[in-house]
Image: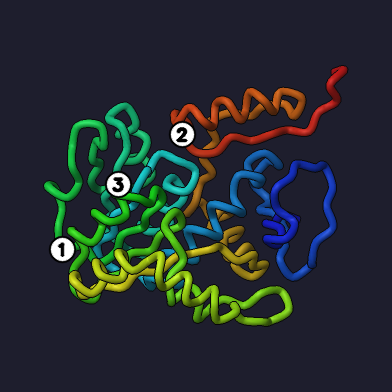
Amino acid sequence: MYGRVEKNRIGTFAEYIATSASIVAPMPKNLTFEEVASIPLVGLTSYQALHDIMNIQSGEKVLIQAGSGGIGTIAIQIAKMLGAYVATTTSRKNFELVKSLGADLAIDYKTEDFTQIISDYDYVFDTQGGKILENAFKIIKPGGKVVSISGLPNEHFADDYHDADGKKLPLWKTCAFKFVTKNLTKLKHESKAEYYFLFMQPDGEQLRTLATLLENGTLHPVIDRIIPFQNIDQAFEYSKSGRTKGKIILKMTNEFD
């Protein structure tokens, strides 16, 4: 089985954990445990952004920020599966990687400004937030959608959110979200586009869908390196370097092996 635990159980590393059966699914038969471990977070996040929120149709254009990262490497593949024309930002040394995953256009974020290269896009999948998120509204077409996992929650998130007990957010939090995203709301109205903040939800059925796509070769895991659990500090240091291509995997091992 493989899965992504509920939000009240994340934030630690452990060999075993108890979780709900509804959020796990049989692991793809053709992958190793390490390959499978790379999928749930990035797979569910990308699928929910590109399939559920954007509902990408064949021929539509999407910009995926940071295409060589953990999210980006899977998001590119899912977007191509859905029939999109995919542009992505990455460093020039990673152009070959993102194009091998299906990207139609690679933009070197170190030397190029994506707002000067592309325009009139249907969707933007933002993984970086800040000014980069704000600039997404410069290239989105009227009626398009900007989906971010690094921006701030807004009224869409507040209206749709329910906790584990089915309760909605209290009114003061909803008002707070609207206040802190007033600049994004302004940009949304000026561009006549929509803005969504995505907080990925665990979903066993979607994992079954992803497993099928992995088994038939539509999707491929991208792993930068596998690091033994006892060297977890090295994993954190490498993650902070910003040079990761795909996912970093921690492997539980006997430190005396």
**Side (left or right) of 5 relative to 125:** right
**Distance (Cα) linking label 3 and label 2:** 14 Å
User: Vertically, is 136 above or below 53?
Assistant: above
Foreground of the two, 128 or 46:
128
Density class for disc 2 (Cα within 10 Å; few <14, some 14-19, many ≥20) is many
Q: In which quarter of the image is residue 20?
A: bottom right
Q: Is residue 57 visible?
A: no
Image quarter where the N terminus lies is bottom right
Residue 57 at x, y percent in the picture: 31, 71
Density class for disc 3 (Cα within 10 Å; few <14, some 14-19, many ≥20) is many
Foreground of the two, 91 or 204:
91
Q: Is mark 2 on a helix, strand or loop?
A: loop
The residue depicted at 24 percent of the width and 54 percent of the height is 135
Residue 45 at x, y percent in the picture: 52, 59
The amino acid type found where label 1 is placed reads Asp
User: Vertically, is 55 above or below 28?
Assistant: below
User: What residue is disc 1 on?
Assistant: 120
Question: Does label 1 or label 2 sit earlier along the sequence?
Answer: 1
The amino acid type found where label 3 is placed reads Thr
Q: What element carries label 1?
A: loop
The amino acid type found where label 2 is placed reads Lys
User: What residue is disc 2 on?
Assistant: 245
Image quarter where the C terminus lies is top right
Q: Which mark is residue 88?
A: 3
Q: What element carries label 3?
A: strand
Q: How is the model colour-coded? A: rainbow
The residue depicted at 29 percent of the width and 68 percent of the height is 58
The residue depicted at 30 percent of the width and 49 percent of the height is 132
Question: Does label 1 or label 3 sit earlier along the sequence?
Answer: 3
